[in-house]
Image (spheres, helix red, strand yellow):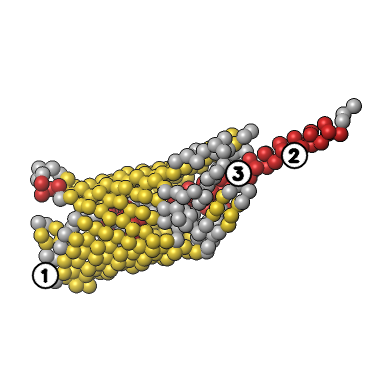
Amino acid sequence: MISRDSIIRLSISRLEAISKLARAAVLIVFLTAASASAQSMFVGGDYVLGNRAAGMSAYVADPDYAHAVFLNPAKLGFAETVYAASDYEYFSRDPGLLFLPSTPSDYLSNGKFSAWDASLVLPLGPFGAGASFSAFDLAGWRTTTSDVGAGVRIPFGFSLGVTGKYITLRKNVAVPGATGSSDLEKFTFDVGAMNRTILANTTFFRAIFSSGIVFTNILPSVKWSGQLGVPLADAAADLPQTFQCGLAYTFASNYRLSDFELFKVTGAIDYSHLFSNSSPIDGFILPRDQYRVGLETIALGILAVRIGYTLKTPVLTGEDLYNRLTVSRMGSGVSYGFSLRFPVKLVLPALPVTSLELSYAKNPEWNSGVYHDLFGVVMEMLF
């Protein structure tokens, strides 16, 4: 005969087991959404690559050449020298602000949050070509993009560009009683246009007005494959498809000292919109609109200081007390950075390297209070 106490203990044990399974399911769903959202930002217009763009925030009308292939391929049409660049990024985090700050490690490792990219730009007369590879790592999740782009100058200061992108996304999940992975492979492309108008060009200074537009992920529809253990597996989704436009104004010295301009100031403003047909990878809500402003000052062609501000709407806030998780407004805030450019050619004239630029930037991607730090290097070479 089964005692009443035994029945109570058995019921409690079953409830605890159900509770653990439910918690595991909640964690899988939340983390899948959160990580896929992060990867969505990486493959779309919501994530900034390149130290200059990250520091200024606004970049569409006047991206740097080295990263133009994934910022605005139209800038490739204006390239006159060879550029090679590489960036590494890691994410700062504060307790309670990032995913699973207090969750036991057997649910999911907090893991590393990092991204890196390498790019190369070649001038080909009125054309310019660029290629890049970028990778984003978040614990068991990884996103890569391989980009090949080209830009061409056309009359009246215009340039047109296109970048083909091959994207891979992989998600690995390991929680008590469940493991799995899901994969996505997709080819898509971006198109961009730019115009540069010289407002003034005297003996002492020049003034240039630039404008630009970019459409990202022209072929957004895609499907997951594999088995994740939740309903998201083998489901249709869309890459984040965006429209971006921007204006920039540059005022610079034409008087040069040792082949470097005395000063240069650039101000820029951007607007970015995530199309409503984009349900980025998993339906996780991302800011639909972004407003970005930025300022860059360069002294003697050596020291550059950058500052910017990004406002993203709508506000996304919430708190999951059960799992001790906090989601706050994603990515609004001040960005800043600086770079030092070393005139290698002046010191070692036999080398093909004209200059070496080392950069740092801090950008408010992801949650409020959680920034990522970017370290980069750009080499400019004679062609």
> Considering depth in this image, is 362 or 382 the residue closer to the camera?
362
Residue drawn 18% across the image and 69% down it: 206
Q: Distance between the Cα atoms at labels 3 and 2?
A: 18 Å
339 is higher (above) or lower (below) than 171: below
Sequence-wise first label, 1 or 3:
3
Q: Secondary structure at mark 1?
A: loop
Sequence-wise first label, 3 or 2:
2
Judge from the rendering whether residue 260 lies leftward or rightward of residue 92; answer left or right: left
Q: Which residue is mark 2?
A: 15
Q: Secondary structure at mark 3?
A: helix
Residue 19, given in percent of the width and then of the height, sits at 70, 41
Q: Distance between the Cα atoms at labels 1 and 3?
A: 64 Å
Judge from the rendering whether residue 141 lies leftward or rightward of residue 382; answer left or right: right
Q: Which residue is mark 1?
A: 203
- Point out the frontmost of discs 1 and 2: 2
Q: Which residue is mark 3?
A: 27
Q: Quadrant of residue 17?
A: top right
Report the amino acid beneath label 1.
Thr
Q: Quadrant of residue 210?
A: bottom left
329 is higher (above) or lower (below) than 37: below
Q: Secondary structure at mark 2?
A: helix
Residue drawn 55% across the image and 59% down it: 317
Residue 163, given in percent of the width and then of the height, sits at 37, 51
Judge from the rendering whether residue 158 lies leftward or rightward of residue 346; answer left or right: right
Report the amino acid beneath label 2.
Leu
Q: Distance between the Cα atoms at labels 1 and 2?
A: 81 Å
> Considering depth in this image, is 62 or 265 the residue closer to the camera?
265
Q: Quadrant of residue 363?
A: bottom left
> Considering depth in this image, is 350 or 331 the residue closer to the camera?
331
Residue drawn 25% across the image and 49% down it: 358
Give the quarter of the figure containing the N terminus: top right
Sequence-wise first label, 1 or 2:
2
